[in-house]
Image: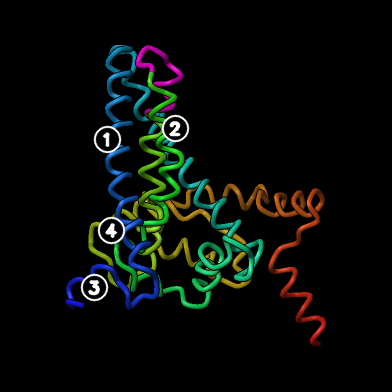
């Protein structure tokens, strides 16, 4: 196999050429879908009239970006907190990378753009395709708001793992360091809080704006209690503590 092709499909990183090409297709579909949603949002805003609609852009941008930060935290919390590598379907593909990341936090820096962002693109397609089909009325204010917010939400989710990777890089590009310093994307000092054992706080990894708020509200602790009381499912930390106590 030519070395260039081998590098492209990344067989040396232990996943199949099919999954590699599936991730590439998902990334390409993301860019296509975000263009479609942006055009739909623009058409709707123009229909409303820019004097009326211009204030909607920063509002929906903020709402969408903060929504992406929350989504990143919620998914991260789920991956860190419940199940294990042996969990059917999700264990190997979803939970294992989260747990391995605590052991080898800089391992993410060894992955290329497709590996870092492919899985997010796959999940985003499940959201973006229905949005383009359902919220397509340029005369509906609700549709316009959802479309505009979805542009910023999906871009934020798509870039989350890239922001995460940059937060672990020793020498990111100067413009990335500036964005981190200004707090517009996840910064290394902020993310270091999560990488302190027992890894049970500061889960949001898009920009991290919600982390201190959710921590003060004890949001994830409350969610864990609700899950335990309603489903009887404990956290992986509980299981580790129980195993440690039994061994002692």
Is residue 124 or residue 245 the one in the foreground?
Answer: 124
Task: Locate residue 167: give its quadrant.
Answer: bottom left
Give the secondary structure at mark 1. Answer: helix
Quadrant of the image occupied by residue 196? bottom right
Q: Give the extent of the magenta segment.
A: 137-147
Q: Examine the structure image and report whether residue 210 is included in the region drawn in magenta.
A: no
Which residue is at 64% across, 50% downward? 216
Nearer the observer: mark 4 or 2; the answer is 2
State which quarter of the image contains the C terminus.
bottom right
Tell which residue pokes out farthest to the bottom in this image: 248
Give how far across and how far down residue 130 sits, in percent.
44, 32
Q: Nearer the viewer, mark 3 or mark 4?
A: 3
What residue would you read off at disc 4? 176
Q: Secondary structure at mark 4?
A: helix
Q: Are marks 2 and 1 in contact (CB under 8 Å)?
A: no
Mark 3 sits on what residue? 7
Disc count in the image?
4
Task: Give the residue number, with chain letter if any, for mark 2.
Answer: 130
Q: Which badge, 4 or 2, comes first in the chain's sequence?
A: 2
Between disc 1 and disc 4, the foreground one is 1
* Residue at position x 42%, y 16% in the image: 141
Quarter of the rendering occupied by the N terminus = bottom left
- Residue 162 drawn at (x, y percent): 35, 58
For residue 145: magenta?
yes
CA distance for labels 4 and 2:
33 Å
Q: Earlier in the sequence, mark 3 or mark 4?
A: 3
């Amino acid at each position: 196999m030519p070395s260039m092709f081998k590098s492209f499909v990344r067989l040396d990183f232990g996943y199949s050429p099919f999954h590699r090409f599936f991730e590439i297709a998902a990334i390409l579909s993301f860019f296509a879908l975000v263009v479609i949603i942006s055009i739909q949002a623009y058409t709707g805003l123009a229909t409303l009239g820019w004097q009326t609609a211009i204030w909607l852009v920063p509002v929906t941008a903020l709402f969408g970006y903060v929504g992406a930060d929350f989504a990143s935290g919620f998914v991260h919390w789920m991956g860190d907190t419940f199940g294990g590598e042996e969990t059917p379907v999700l264990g190997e593909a979803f939970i294992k990378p989260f747990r391995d990341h605590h052991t080898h936090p800089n391992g993410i820096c060894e992955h290329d753009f497709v590996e870092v962002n492919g899985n997010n693109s796959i999940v985003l397609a499940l959201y973006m395709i229905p949005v383009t089909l359902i919220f397509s009325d340029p005369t509906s204010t609700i549709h316009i708001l959802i479309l505009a917010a979805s542009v910023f939400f999906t871009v934020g989710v798509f870039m989350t793992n890239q922001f995460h990777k940059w937060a672990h890089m020793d020498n990111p590009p100067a413009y990335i360091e500036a964005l981190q310093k200004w707090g517009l994307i996840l910064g290394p000092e902020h993310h270091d809080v999560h990488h302190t054992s027992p890894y049970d706080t500061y889960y949001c990894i898009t920009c991290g704006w919600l982390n201190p708020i959710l921590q003060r509200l004890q949001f994830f602790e409350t969610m864990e209690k609700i899950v335990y009381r309603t489903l009887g499912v404990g956290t992986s930390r509980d299981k580790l503590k129980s195993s440690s106590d039994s061994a002692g």
